[in-house]
Image (cartoon, rainbow, N blue to C red):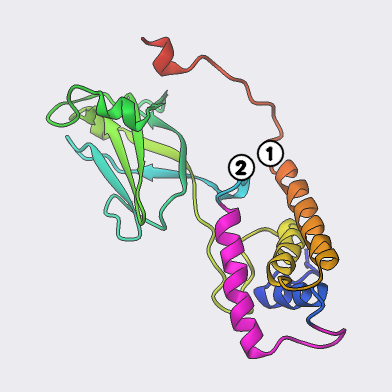
Amino acid sequence: MTNSTSNTAYGIINDAMFDAGYLQEGAEADSEQLAIYMRRLCDIINLWQTQGIKLFLQEEITVPLVLNQTQYVIGPIGPAVTMDKPLQVLQGFVLNTSFTRRPLVPISRDEWERLSQVTGNSGTINSYFADKQAYALNLNLWPAPDSTEVLNTATFLMRVQVKNPILLTDNTAFPQEWRMALRWGLADDIGTGQPESIMSRFQHRATAYRTALENFDVEDVSTRFNVDSPFYNT
């Protein structure tokens, strides 16, 4: 179905500038304004993707298992998986050759450091530690897969990064329902220096629209909580 709303960076920037009082009706941003506010829009997108659930950023990533290998580097240069650095590993499982899933237990850095042996041993994977680095995510599996386990498939549900718009005609990777929040978020960001009453209006609208979207961005089915596995196994 045709979308009548422009979700491009160009459309959002012009509307935000109009909302901020920097453009009159019918006017358009010049090249310098577009360059500056494109950067600011990307800043907002890069920050907002780290906040809340963002269901549209969740993606299942398959990590190829290697015999006796503990660490799998996921990032722009891989080598385990080549992609933009994932923001978060939400959960994982191993799918065996009989197509049966075996859930994996996430462990903290402290729990990882307390393991008596993390290299030189192999077996059936039961846990993982997601080590977040600046440009890559180091996914550590324990124990390392043995000759039987390496035949299985390890899959992880991750929160991936939003692609920034490069051209002004590019659509933002945030879906169209987020356009109003992005528009007023940018207006609030660029409206600095205006009278307090006007800046308060920007902030109020930006907060209200974003809050509405964060409340919308939840799963349709209720979440059930179980006893934490590491605690239960102690």
The answer to whether residue 16 is left or right of residue 105 is: right
Q: What crowding class fits label 2: few (fewer than 14 Cα within 10 Å), some (14-19), or many (20 or more)?
A: some
Marker count (numbered): 2
Query: Going 62% across and 47% down the picture, which residue do you hit?
Result: 54
Q: Which residue is mark 1?
A: 218
Residue in the picture at 32% in, 25% down: 111
Tell me which corner region of the image, top left, top right, bottom left or bottom right, holds residue 102. Answer: top left
The image shows residue 7 at horizontal and vertical percentages of 71, 69
Q: Which mark is residue 148?
A: none
Q: Position of residue 29 (x, y in %)?
A: 72, 86
SS for dot 2: loop
Q: Quadrant of the N terminus?
A: bottom right
The range drawn in magenta is 23-49
Percent across and percent down for residue 68 are 17, 34
Nearer to the camera, 203 or 11: 203
Amino acid residing under circle 1: Val
Label 1 secondary element: loop
Residues at marks 1 and 2, CA–CA distance in whole angstroms:
7 Å
Where residue 55 appears, as percent x and y from the top left, is 62, 44
> Which quarter of the figure has residue 6?
bottom right
Residue 53, numbered label: 2
Image quarter hosting the C terminus: top left
- Where is 61 relative to 105, above or below? below
Residue type at mark 2 is Ile
Against 49, is 146 above or below? above
Q: Is residue 101 left or right of residue 178?
A: left
* The one of 30 and 195 positioned closer to us in this rendering: 195
Above or below, 97 against 81 in this view is above
Whether the magenta-drawn stretch holds residue 39 is answered as yes
- Residue found 82% across the figure and 77% down from its top: 21
In the image, 89 versus 188, the foreground residue is 188
Q: Main secondary structure of the magenta part?
A: helix
